[in-house]
Image (tube, grey):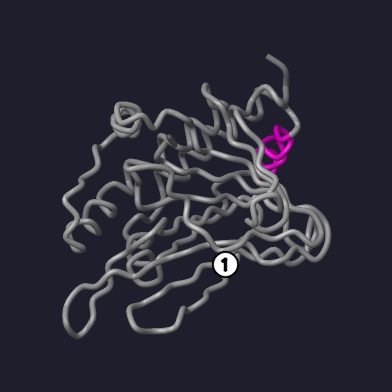
Amino acid sequence: MNASLQAAMRDADESVARLDGCDWARVADDLDARGSAIIETLLAPQQCRMLAGLYGQDGLFRSRVVMGRHGFGRGEYRYFDYPLPGLVARLRATLYPPLVPIANRWNAAMGVDVRYPGTHADFVERCHDAGQRRPTPLLLQYGAGDYNCLHQDLYGEHVFPLQVAVLLSEPGRDFGGGEFVLTEQRPRMQSRPEVVPLRQGDAVVFAVHHRPVRGTRGIYRVNHRHGVSRVHAGHRHTLGLIFHDAT
């Protein structure tokens, strides 16, 4: 085993340890209040560079999407194929369980009957049984002038209501602009935007589609979309961790 691989595995263990020490009560409170929460320094800089460097390795991916061809924005992204790279698989499996109580509580509040199993393997099996067999973790790549239009990552009947994005590049050094943006649409109200400040290695957990909000007349559903503002200079890479698979 070479030194760089040993370092990557050591960093992976450190990232999982950071998740063990994460204040999930604070994450839940932030998600309830705003629809997003930051986990600081989830990945070390070496890990970020290693993951960003995977983008050119064709054998790791099942597809490449050039956003401009589909009206999604500018830039491109690639979906990993199974088997996922070890770190990506481990993060996906480790992040899922502490988010399950939040997801189940949200569904109960919104009157949605679906409940999620405690392990990601069991949830993926549910997806695969329904024909959603294509993995959805992805790497996104932006250059100067690129952006990602507001959207939702819905790939089939089975949708886990939370997902995670990890910024792999360093703002102000690797790129300028390119802020992560969320919008919230409440019934009979105009959309409210929010910029989520991220540093290299930070993860943002956010609502995929809906979340419950308590109003004067009880609980109602808020609709969320996310995107990335225009990159002014440099290059920006992001790891996206979506927990449901695609049809």
Q: Which residue corresponds to the image point at 72% horizontal and 40% vertical from the top-left?
A: 49
The tally of labels here is: 1
Name the image quarter holding the C terminus: top left
Our reading of the magenta stretch's main secondary structure is helix
Q: Nearer the viewer, residue 130 or 221?
A: 130
Nearest the viewer among 213 and 101 is 213
Residue 126 location, x and y as percent? 28, 31
In the drawing, does residue 198 fall left or right of residue 38? right
* Residue 39: x %, y % from top left: 49, 55
Q: Judge left or right: residue 173 versus residue 188.
A: right
Indicate whether 125 appears above or below 98.
above
Q: Is residue 185 left or right of residue 66?
A: left
Q: Amino acid at mark 1?
A: Val
Q: Depth check: 12 or 214 in front?
A: 214
Task: Name above or below for residue 119 compared with residue 108.
Answer: above
Q: Secondary structure at mark 1?
A: strand
The residue lying at 53 percent from left, 53 percent from top is: 203
Q: Position of residue 245 (x, y in %)?
A: 42, 36
Q: What residue is pinned by disc 1?
A: 181
Q: In terms of depth relative to the viewer, which is nearer, 97 or 219?
A: 219
Q: Which residues are magenta?
A: 45-55
Residue for point 47% across, 31% down: 90
Give the position of the N terminus as an image quadrant.
Answer: top right
